[in-house]
Image (tube, rainbow, N blue to C red):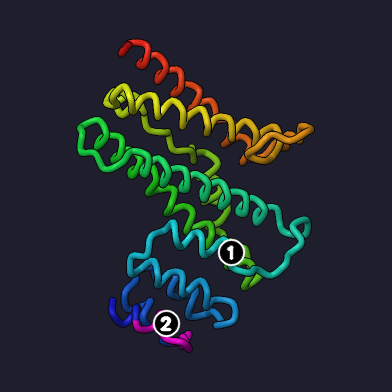
Amino acid sequence: MDDIKTWLQSQNKDYSKGVELFEKHHKNKMLARYFNNGKPATHAKKLEYELKKLIGIPLTILFAENSIEEKPVVTIALLPEIIKQAKTAVYELFTSISIAHRHLYELGESNAEEIVKQRKQLIDERLPLIRRYEQIYLLKEQYFTTGVISPELPLLLHEHANSGTQTQPPSTDCKIRQLSGVELMKKRQSTIVIINKLQNRLQYQKQTKADKPNPMPPSPLRDELEAKLATLKEELAKIVQLIEKKK
């Protein structure tokens, strides 16, 4: 993979050389054909993304880079319905993958049997989401390049619509029960602070209170924040219960 690293570090990244490297190290023939038929102006960023992924750059970094790339302005209302659905699916999958990353981080590095079991479950749930994200994203972008809707896209969207995209949050009971009395008090305070900030975001669209309410409108983000708030309130109740037992 050193040849890919050299290409990525070069100032003038030759598109043809990049495609050649992709074909050499990647087994996805459909994706290779996509780059071979593409043009540097429209395909270079996606090629660079795929090559970075090949050498093991974390997906969280790649997703962040992707989200800030400049895209051509397209009027959403004029897009075919199937492409609108694809954009929605990509957003939902991106959100679910991000949630899974956060849950994995929250589990920590413990090798306790219950934690290892939860970690494996999260990884197993996350993998098909990543694969589906990449497939739908690729075919969606292919439409913007060629103007042609791939016959595979409706099938993938149907599969996405009939499968759950949300990863289940790991149980916190095991971790909380391992905390000392002092640690529980700290955990209680930090959880209350997070709850207050979430409530303020929902009611005022900012982390601090404002003079007048400005509720967050219905959206996938609001749904996610409300779900997180409910989970944190349940966690707080368990923490308070454990504190009382240790008195």
Q: In the picture provided, is 91 more to the left or to the right than 217? A: left
x 46%, y 32%: residue:
190
Q: Nearer the viewer, residue 34 or 213?
A: 213
Residue 20 placed where, x, y %?
A: 38, 83
Residue 117 placed where, x, y %?
A: 26, 34
Magenta stretch bounds:
6-16
Q: In the picture provided, is 116 more to the left or to the right than 138? A: left
Which residue is label 2 attached to? 18
Q: Nearer the viewer, residue 133 or 242?
A: 242
Work out whether 3 lies above or below 216.
Answer: below
Queried whether the magenta region covers residue 107, the answer comes back as: no
Q: CA distance from mark 1 to mark 2?
A: 22 Å
Q: Secondary structure at mark 2?
A: helix
x 53%, y 46%: residue:
95
What mark, if any, has residue 207 been given in the picture?
none
Q: Residues within 10 Å of mark 1 (few under 14, many from 20)?
A: few
Q: Secondary structure at mark 1?
A: helix
* Mark 2: amino acid: Gly
Q: Earlier in the sequence, mark 1 or mark 2?
A: 2
Residue 107 placed where, x, y %?
A: 33, 38
Q: How many marks?
A: 2
x 41%, y 47%: residue:
101
What mark, if any, has residue 68 been given in the picture?
1
Q: Nearer the viewer, residue 55 or 205?
A: 205
Work out whether 192 lies above or below 97.
Answer: above
Residue 97 placed where, x, y %?
A: 46, 47
Q: In the picture provided, is 116 more to the left or to the right than 234? A: left
